[in-house]
Image (tube, grey):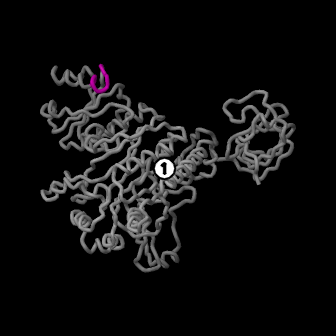
Amino acid sequence: MKKTYNTSLSVKDINKTVELYGWISNKRKFKDQYFIDLRDSSGIIQLVMHGISDPSLTKESCLKVKGIVKRRIEENEQLKTGKIEVHVLQYEILNISNQIPFEISRENTANEDLRLEYRFLDLRQEKMLDNLKLRHKLFLLIRNYFNKAGFIEVETPILSKSTPEGARDYLVPTRRKGKFFALPQSPQLYKQLLMAAGVERYFQIARVFRDEDLRKDRQPEFTQLDIEMSFGGQKELFKLCEKLWKTVLEPLGWKIKTPFPEMDFETAMLRYGNDKPDTRFGFLINDFSKELCQMLVKDYVKVMFFDRDVAEHMQIINETFRKNNGETLLIKTKEELKEFGPEIEEKLLQKAYEEDNLEDPICVFSLANKEENALKSLGAIRTLLNEIFEIADPNQLNFLWIVNWPMFEFDENENKYVSAHHPFTQFERNTLKYLKTGEFEKVRAKSYDLVLNGFELGSGSIRIHDAETQKLMFDVLGISEKEQHDKFSFFLKAFDYGLPPHNGIAFGLERLLMILTNSSSIRDVIAFPKNAKGIDLLSASPSNVSEEQLKEYSIKLIEER
């Protein structure tokens, strides 16, 4: 069994005989000496071999060595073991490596799909291994925190019932003809049933599955921190979560200031153009509809002031604008503002100075007949410009609660209102009157999101705990009594047996790790992720199955015409 790790050695071990195991990271020859960088899971140490020339010592071969620790003549400050080296007395090649498909280095520039195909090699990178170690430490700190807070971790089923939760389900066929399980999009109903069971304080580091369009902060399967508690309100949950992230992240080297600020959903949309604003930098959205709508022949005119020339990035700016339902985009320099007349020019320049201290601004206008289009398109450009110019400090963590959410949002494809979160979210009672008037957009939910650096880190709500309100929600959403019974009867039984008031939240842990490690994608903080198309290149899945397997599950494939 391995007893000594590379980075456990120091100058205190000089002249000791040690036995090491690892992989050949690099090798170079000088006169009759071979210098080998031996890498193990802790880091790299330099080996020195005298008078040895062995062609089997290839990069990434697995090696066992016995040698004496010596002080290095030339120290390497970039290595933990940079003051020492091991002079090899004997070695054994445990497994020879073929020529590697890409160089394994701290900043791997190889094609990502190639890296994912050889993920076991990719994970040998110091950065990738550090990410996995951080993930382990984070999960351990989370579990310790909740244990001390009186919560218990309960595992909920992976094979469950298909219920409408937003994304498409991953379905699992069974040998019962026509009957399917679904992989959980969240443990939502089970954790609420645990409150009915009297658990009171539950948490789980849960694996969840969603068949949705992928992007850099999404994967088909991912890990979330799930929390639910009885007899508490929003204030208690906020306090619990703020203490959680302070307790967990400060030992990892981050300074966390509590309490976290709160922002209304409406403010986030009007000033940042999205519901997960990055508050690390300025350039907020301003409304000039009153001054310019008649001149520009649009109902809404929104403007953002910027401080850098964007001319060379216009292609991607236009693409982003159109992708986010932008209608008309105008970009004006300070000189070009004269087109609007002296009074409006002065107002724009005054606002640019007040908001962002800019005397010579670039003005980005979004014009639309639908306010949402004007706001979201400009918000997307703000996010894009931050990515291009790296405005925000990557070492700063800005947590923000988004509150006072709409209960419903209009789905244009289905031509009806749907739940903005999920159908088990409690109403803000003082907005129920708008159901009677048909003003669904004014109905508010007792829901909340925690945002971090422009990403939705977590989402939660106060839950409905009485049957009458739950029926009201289903009726508004047009869920028939038959559908209620077919999909939710196992859950609705709890309403008849003393279901307590409860609330909860769930956090995306890979998103958090992506932010903490300044990674470009959550794929860099998952050991074996799917690629951008949802394919596991390592195992070449999803893949075909045999006719016998399909027949066993009463499935017949229909050829596309």
Q: Which residue is mark 1?
A: 510
Category of crowding for the residue at label 1, using alpha-carbon neighbours closer than 10 angstroms: few (below 14), some (14–19), many (at least 20): many
Q: Is residue 524 left or right of residue 287?
A: right
Extent of the magenta region: 352-359
> In percent of the image, x 73 and y 39: which residue is there?
45
In the image shown, does 501 or 317 lie closer to the viewer? 501
> In percent of the image, x 46 and y 54: which residue is there?
225
In the rendered image, residue 380, in percent from the top left (x then y), is placed at 33, 40
Query: Does the magenta portion include 354?
Result: yes
Assign a secondary structure to mark 1. Answer: helix
> In percent of the image, x 40 and y 41: which residue is there?
399
Q: Is residue 385 above or below residue 165?
A: above
Q: Is residue 21 left or right of residue 515?
A: right
Q: Is residue 125 left or right of residue 259?
A: right
| Residue type highlighted by circle 1 | Glu
In the image shown, does 430 or 411 lie closer to the viewer? 430
Magenta stretch, overall SS: helix
In the rendered image, residue 445, in percent from the top left (x then y), is placed at 26, 53
> In percent of the image, x 41 and y 39: which residue is there?
258
Q: To which quarter of the image does residue 333 belong?
A: top left
In the rendered image, residue 117, in percent from the top left (x then y), is placed at 58, 53
